[in-house]
Amino acid sequence: MRRFLPTILVIVALGVLARMIMLDVGSGGDEKRPRLVVHFVDVGPGGCTVIRTPDGRTILIDAGSSERSDHLLSYLSDLEISRIDLLVITSSDEVRAGGLPMLLEEVGVSRVLDAARRPGGSAYQQAIRVMDERRIDRDALDEGRDLGISNCVQFKVLWPAVGATVSGDESVVLRLAYGEISFLLAGDMAAHSEARLLAEYHDLRSTVLRVPNSGDPLSASNEFLQIVRPEYAVVFTEAGAFAETVMDRLIASGSKVFRTDDNGDIVFSTDGLRVWTECAQLVLCEFARLSIASKRIRRFCFWANMARSLEPGPGVCCRTTRLRAPCLR
């Protein structure tokens, strides 16, 4: 027992510090400033992102797989979303477009921007038929275009490049900015596409990065991370599918990492100056998760996570209360 005492003391101290920071940050600042809220919904590796702008607009990027449609619809219902102002379709494949038919049956959609470059599967084709029947405004997604959905935020298409034809270049990269806080939503960029993006855009620094290609071993290169320098990184992935080499690179870059296989649904909210996070389930404590910690500390946090016994704090959230924990910045 004595040999575990230092580890236990470290965990207890971090829990106390986290609670103090939560009380301090949560009680100060301008609470009246409207917030941008970005939800990364756990609908499989293809992902789904729900954005609520400070002026009340709702944007949805992809709908995940058909197997997770019930979760997406339940999530939107919990947010009291009955209409989407802008639906962005980044691909016609099942993991991103599979949930579209059920979504269109249950939720109204005002406008669609479609970046799919292939006919796609049955779910995508069914969704297109529904859009045509309902005469939903549908346009192509063009590089350099400002989506113009809100006067409060900047929302720009960075990729695909004009003339891109290979499969890896089908991915869509979007950049969302509100005040001093920005989100780089990198989709499924292949390694060669990352290099071309870096060559075209010299200022990609972003507060939050959606890690490209679901954490594929060749994604999120050191050069890419050095340019983007994200404070937080979000990975849509399934258990066992996230490459440890990518995790190592993200940790080395100083990013705090959130994964849907560990965290479930992940939420970022910002007033343009600060960032708060919230997740659907308890995860490893931030110290063990995001720093070079000993195996003993990682093991302790693993079992604490399994027992659901850690005090909620930065990067540690409670399934039942969905406590919002301000991030260390």
Image (cartoon, rainbow, N blue to C red):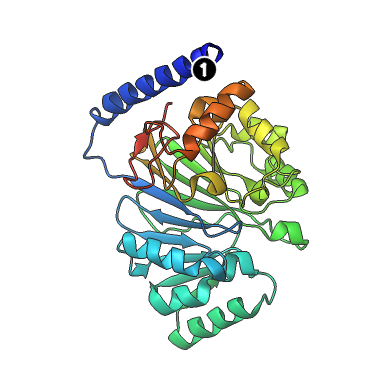
Residue beneath the point at 45% across and 34% down: 315
Q: Total of numbered circles in the picture? A: 1
Image location of residue 303, percent across then percent down: 52, 34
Residue beneath the point at 57% across and 58% down: 44
Q: Is residue 195 left or right of residue 1?
A: right
- Relative depth, front residue between 143 and 39: 39
State which quarter of the image contains the C terminus: top left
- Relative depth, front residue between 78 and 87: 78
Residue beneath the point at 58% across and 29% down: 299
Is label 1 in a helix, a strand or a loop? helix
Compared with residue 286, is residue 272 higher up or lower down, i.e. above or below?
below
Residue beneath the point at 58% across and 54% down: 144
Image location of residue 2, percent across then percent down: 52, 11
Image location of residue 319, percent across then percent down: 39, 46
Point out the residue furthest to the front here. 1
| Residue 91 at least partly seen | no
Compared with residue 154, is residue 302 higher up or lower down, i.e. above or below?
above
Asked where in the image residue 27 lies, by quadrant, the reply is: top left
Provide the residue designation for mark 1.
7
Compared with residue 10, is residue 313 higher up or lower down, i.e. above or below?
below
Q: Is residue 291 left or right of residue 24?
A: right
Crowdedness near tag 1: few (<14), some (14–19) or many (≥20) residues, C-alpha within 10 Å? some
Asked where in the image residue 166 lies, by quadrant, the reply is: bottom right
Image location of residue 199, percent across then percent down: 71, 41
| Residue 303 at least partly seen | yes
Looking at numbered disc 1 in the image, what kind of residue is underneath it?
A: Thr
